[in-house]
Amino acid sequence: MSKTINDIVLSVVIPCYNEKNTIETVLDAVRNCGVKNTEIIVVDDYSTDGTRDLLQGALRGKIDRLIFHKSNQGKGAALAKGFRAATGDVVVIQDADLEYDPKDFVRLLEPFVSGRADADVVYGSRYARGEKYMIKRFYHTMGNKFLTFVSNLFTDMGLTDMETCYKMFRREVIQSITIEEKRFGFEPEITAKIAKKEKHYRIYEIPISYYPRTYSEGKKIGVKDGVRAIYCILKYNLFS
């Protein structure tokens, strides 16, 4: 892909569930992320807090593609729907909260366009320290690092952050992969599938900034999702 960042069309897939307090700020941040051409795709996973009214009302003009689920299906299901709708050169995931900074998109795009421009997949790592580093909860951090370690054992990759939201793909790569997991099992599933040796995908990891929120502020992932992640690591690396 012999292009500059200004030539790239970046499809930003935003799975959204009950984020009425943050969704407008996120949409504005994505639109002003520094990437000239963005396609914003929001998949609302049957929000019940007024988010849906905002999306189809006051915020509709900020969104290029708006998709509504008729029932709550989970983040993985929302992402699968958003990936299929993407038309850009490169696709990235953006959560609908304020934990990740879209200004990092420019940095994440560099392996797709600079030098050999040979990236197929780029992960944004919260633990490979970059310019900004906010101290995180110890047990949550150790949980993420443990899951990354177990994933690396089976994928033979040297990732520092398998559970990161910021995963960026060439569109043809992500649209060629069938997503089976409906909830947060998406992270180990997609990591296992891109790591398959017969795929020969070129994978990079770039430091990103991160501002974690608490469960009282709306964080949704929990212990049962960690247990599911272990199951998914085994399933998609050994039996899929």
Image (tube, rainbow, N blue to C red):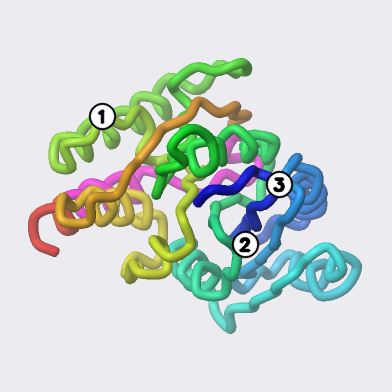
What secondary structure is the magenta-colored segment mainly? Answer: helix
**Mark 1 residue element:** loop
Which callout, 3 or 2, points to the residue nearer the camera? 3
Residue 160: give x, y in percent of width and height.
Answer: 35, 27
Q: Residue at x 35, y 69 (%)?
A: 176
Q: Residues within 10 Å of mark 3 (few under 14, many from 20)?
A: few
The residue segment tinted magenta is 213-233
Q: Which of pointers 3 and 2 lies earlier in the amino acid sequence?
A: 3
Residue position marked by numbered label 2 in the rendering: 17
Query: Can you say which quadrant of the picture contains the C terminus?
Result: bottom left
Residue position marked by numbered label 3 in the rendering: 6
Q: Nearer the viewer, residue 172 or 225?
A: 172
Which callout, 2 or 1, points to the residue nearer the camera? 1
Query: Residue 188's mark?
Result: none
Name the kind of residue labelled 1 in the image. Gly
Name the kind of residue labelled 3 in the image. Asn
Which callout, 3 or 1, points to the residue nearer the camera? 3
Q: Residues within 10 Å of mark 2 (few under 14, many from 20)?
A: many
Name the kind of residue labelled 2 in the image. Tyr
**Mark 3 residue element:** helix
Disc 3/disc 1 C-alpha distance (Å): 30 Å
Residue furthest bottom in the image: 70
Residue position marked by numbered label 1 in the rendering: 158
Residue 46 in view in this figure: yes
Q: Is residue 61 left or right of residue 219?
A: right
Residue 183: give x, y in percent of width and height.
Answer: 41, 61
